[in-house]
Amino acid sequence: MTIIEISCVEVWQEVSNYLDGGAAPDLRLRMEEHFKNCEHCTAILDGTRNIIHLVGDERAFEVPQWLSESLKTWLEGKLGG
Amino acid sequence: MCVRPDAIIINQILSLQRRIGILDLVPEISGQGLRRRIEWSRCLAARIEAWKAMQKKASTQSTAISSRLEMRSPEAEIALIERVCAGEKHLFYDLICPYERSVYLLAYSLLRNQADAAEVIQQAFLKAFCDLTNFRRESKFRTWLIQIAINEAKLKLRKERKAFYESIDEQQKANDGKVFPKDFADWREIPSESLERAELRQALQRAIGSLEPIYREVFVLRDVEELSISETARILGISEASVKTRLLRARLQMRDALAPGFDGAWRIGDSVWKKTRPW
């Protein structure tokens, strides 16, 4: 099977969709072939994947410790609970 | 070997050094008299105990919240909603408690201010309570809450920072054309363990804050809140294609923002990128 080459610019436009599993199978195949031979696009793919992974981690963001108590008290006051 | 009490305490302190950021005080006590060193050691030990107690409390709270979330089935959630609607108002906090963190993070990401975010989530939850009888089960309760919170956050921005938010309306018209990454250099993965470091958390917050609002809201809903493309589109009232385009732009900008290393470890020397990072 011949795989039609894809340019770096096309890869950049699809990299997010690719990571979300939204790229069509033939496009996915072409991108995977491209990644094998293009360090720059692989760096972009890996970096973007890493960002998604990091921000999805619960430890990435902190919530103030006073928040729960303050919200609960406020709601009880408003709702008369 | 006889180990002096202050030496034991100092060792305890040093063993915790990587976990808390207060222990740069240790070098200050070296070279001082024994009595002074013992006083310092005791003072620091008390701080460590307080820190441990705080961590334990936070961990217990977090476990309680996550277990509530895990244990609650969709049916149980609907039952809880029905009880609140039937007049058991005191159960409302139990209903929203598992989503408090999520809604706060969304509000904070948009408003960039703790007090504003706290105010917005109060208003959002109050609105949710008032409209609870109108909640249609076509969407998840969490998605519904997020939608209310995002509307409240936008309302606050419009009221208080009109000029700032007008730029969003302009951005809505902006072209969602081709996106070009800025940094093509080799990427060394930032391990998740680095999230224990405050610098990385702050760098992530700064990077999110640097995104233009229309990209930030999509990024937060999709990658922080982990909503689907269609849920994100529905909440923001835009097409799925627009969500995808904005998400691409946001993710690449986030990558560009963090590519030089969150502590600026990458340097240019003789026009060459130095590919060493501290993790």
Image: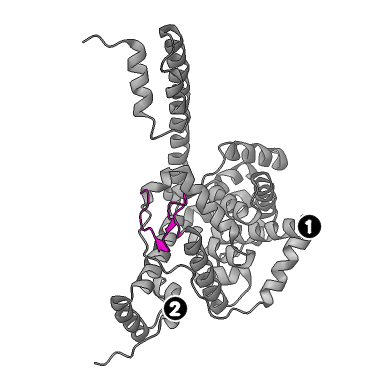
Farthest-out residue, left: B1
Secondary element under disc 2, as helix, strand or loop, is helix
Is any part of residue B226 visible from this angle?
Answer: no
Subunit under mark 1: B
Question: Magenta stretch mostly in which secondary structure?
Answer: loop
Residue nearer the viewer, B228 or B169: B169
Farthest-out residue, front: B270
- In the rendered structure, find residue B159 and report the number of the disc placed on it: 1
The percent coordinates of residue B268 (x first, y second) are 44, 59
Q: Quadrant of residue B213?
A: bottom right
Residue nearer the viewer, A64 or B34: B34
In magenta stretch: residue B261: yes
Residue under the point 44% across and 35% down = B60
Kind of residue at disc 2: Glu
Kind of residue at disc 1: Lys
Q: Which residue is mark 2?
A: A14
Residue under the point 41% across and 61% down = B270
Secondary element under disc 1, as helix, strand or loop, is helix
Is any part of residue B214 visible from this angle?
Answer: yes
The percent coordinates of residue A11 (x first, y second) are 41, 79
Q: Which residues are magenta?
A: B259-279
